[in-house]
Image: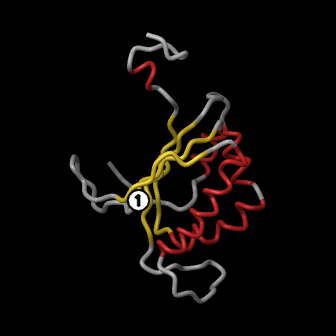
Amino acid sequence: MIVENAVYPDEEQMAGFLEPGHSGPIYMINLLRFRDKAEYEDGRVTELSGRQAYDLYGSAVGRLLPKFGGGAMFKAEVSRLSLGKVEDLWDVVAIVQYPSKQAMLDMLMSPEMQEIGAHRAAGLAGQLNIETVDGLGAWLGQDKSGGA
């Protein structure tokens, strides 16, 4: 298994995201890895750590998500790997819910997101984003309405 952190999706990943299909809520699992020191693409000088730069982005996204019907579901520090092996661990795991792929895309393309994106790029050494859809009801033997 190859694990490659990235800051932006490649063309194939973006095309997959834009394919028609699932129209309901999605849950994005974010595995985040921070730079030791923030590095802004515009060359600005900063004393911020990567985590501090990303926290500026994260706080702004937290305020922006409700405007697009989404919300932060979970965030935690990664403390250790209890099963399996990877070369390096991520720093933080976060799960964000969007009512649809379109809502997420609308938020990503918004002027507000464009304005705060520099902090994300400056703070991240890389990340994995895993797009998931709700399957818990089927897993538990329940129909979509939550009944048995």
Residue at 64% across, 71% down: 118
Graded by Cα atoms within 10 Å as few (under 14), some (14 to 19) or many (20 or more), the crowding at tag 1 reads some
Indicate whether 123 appears above or below 31: below
Up-down relation of residue 63 to residue 55 (above or below): above
Name the side, left or right, on which 18 lies relative to 128. right
At x 65%, y 29%, the residue is 23
Look at 59% across and 79% down and name the residue there. 40
Identify residue for label 1.
92
**Residue 54, x across and y down, in percent:** 53, 68
Question: In the displayed structure, would residue 67 be above or below residue 4?
Answer: above
Specify the amino acid type for callout 1. Answer: Val
Element under disc 1: strand
- The percent coordinates of residue 47 (x first, y second) are 52, 87
Closest to the observer, 11 or 106: 106
Count the marks: how many?
A: 1
Image-based side of 141 in relation to 46, left or right:
left
Q: Is residue 114 above or below residue 134?
A: below
Q: Assign the C terminus to one quadrant of the image.
A: top left
Which residue is at the far right?
111
Q: Nearer the viewer, residue 21 or 34?
A: 34
